Amino acid sequence: MSRTAGLPAKSLLLLLAAGTASAAISAAPAALDYVVRGDGVVAAVIGGQPARLRISPWAPAAPTLNPDFAQRIGLRGGLFGFAVKVGPVKVGGQSSVTRLEVSKASFRRRVVWFDRPWSAGADAAVGPGGLPVDVVRFELRAPQPGERTVALPLDQAMFRPSYGRVAIGKRSLIVLFDPQHRQTLATAGAGATLAESFGGQFYGVADRAEVAFGIQRPVRAMRLARPLSVGPLAIDRLLVRTGDNGSVAGIPDADADPEEIVVTAKGGNRRDVLIIGRDQLDRCSSITFDKKVHLIRMACV
């Protein structure tokens, strides 16, 4: 499963629903709603060929194909390609226009594909922004007693995943949702903002986590003295990418040797992104993207 980055004209954050069973997608009577269950993988037709399409809350609005599938259906890229970066790794991409058939809907979309596979276990992936419906609801599990539903503003651009924003002082974090991310993950800039505002500090040893295209990047675990509220969720532990999109040099380290000098990250183009993973979303029965009213509704305990 792939994770984070940024697409054409530097605009796409690639920063792809939980479970292992096959997914189900159903149209509401007015054909305005999709309900996505299981692992989000559904039968589709792309470019006239059968395909396994993953519908995910964090996939881009532009359907993103694996390179072998793009080749199989005979797509040719346009005159100008593009590239995205995952940390220091640059991944080349191309785009074209083709027809998709999902459930009873048939529509044309600009699709993209890269030098590396984007989605494991599927031929392609698309987020709520790429489906021709008003509402996409991801059912993660059965509703539980004591749940409450809280809404966040929904932002959407052509090549971006559907995302929310959380204001922290004068800054704001882009918030993405991915039940297939095992743990909640922040860029370095987001981690620095959270540490400053909520009393965060690193603990434990350095590790690596997959970000996108199977590429792993260095991370550290961070705990917050005061939890961050995202809708109904209170987040007090997360992973932070220590070398990408910002600097974590000012974050206290609970396990640091006071005699040791450690350089933890460099600066760079700052993009404060928080991907909420399964460790938090296991508390939620559903995430609903209502594009008509520009809201993300989270039902969680």
Image (tube, grey):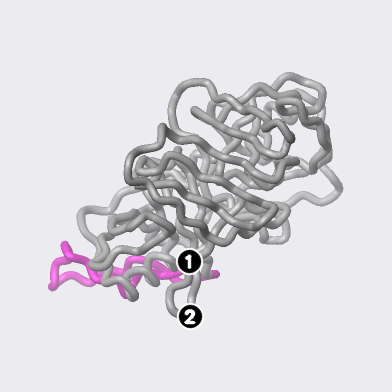
Which amino acid is tagged 1? Val
Query: Which residue has dot 1 on it?
Result: 166
Question: Percent position (x, y) of residue 284?
Answer: 40, 43
Crowd around label 1: few <14 · some 14–19 · many ≥20 (10 Å): some
Q: Which residue occupies the foreground of this view, 22 or 11? A: 22
Instruction: Give, as a single range, the part of the protein colored magenta.
Output: 245-269
Which amino acid is tagged 2? Lys
Give the secondary structure at mark 1: strand
Question: Percent position (x, y) of residue 11?
Answer: 67, 60
Q: Is residue 160 magenta?
A: no
Question: Percent position (x, y) of residue 293?
Answer: 66, 56
Q: Residue at x 32, y 46 (%)?
A: 146
Crowd around label 2: few <14 · some 14–19 · many ≥20 (10 Å): few
Q: Is residue 261 magenta?
A: yes
Q: Which residue occupies the foreground of this view, 222 or 225? A: 225
Contact, mark 1 vs mark 2 (Cβ under 8 Å): no
Measured along the vertical axis of the image, is residue 28 above or below residue 9? above
Q: Residue at x 18, y 70 (%)?
A: 260
Residue 170 is labelled as: 2
Please tell me how many numbered marks the rendered image carries: 2
Measured along the vertical axis of the image, is residue 21 above or below residue 80? above
Horizontally, residue 119 falls left or right of residue 252, namely right
Give the secondary structure at mark 2: loop
Disc 1 to disc 2, C-alpha distance: 11 Å
Q: Residue at x 77, y 49 (%)?
A: 81
Secondary structure, magenta segment, majority class: loop
Horizontally, residue 139 falls left or right of residue 195, namely right
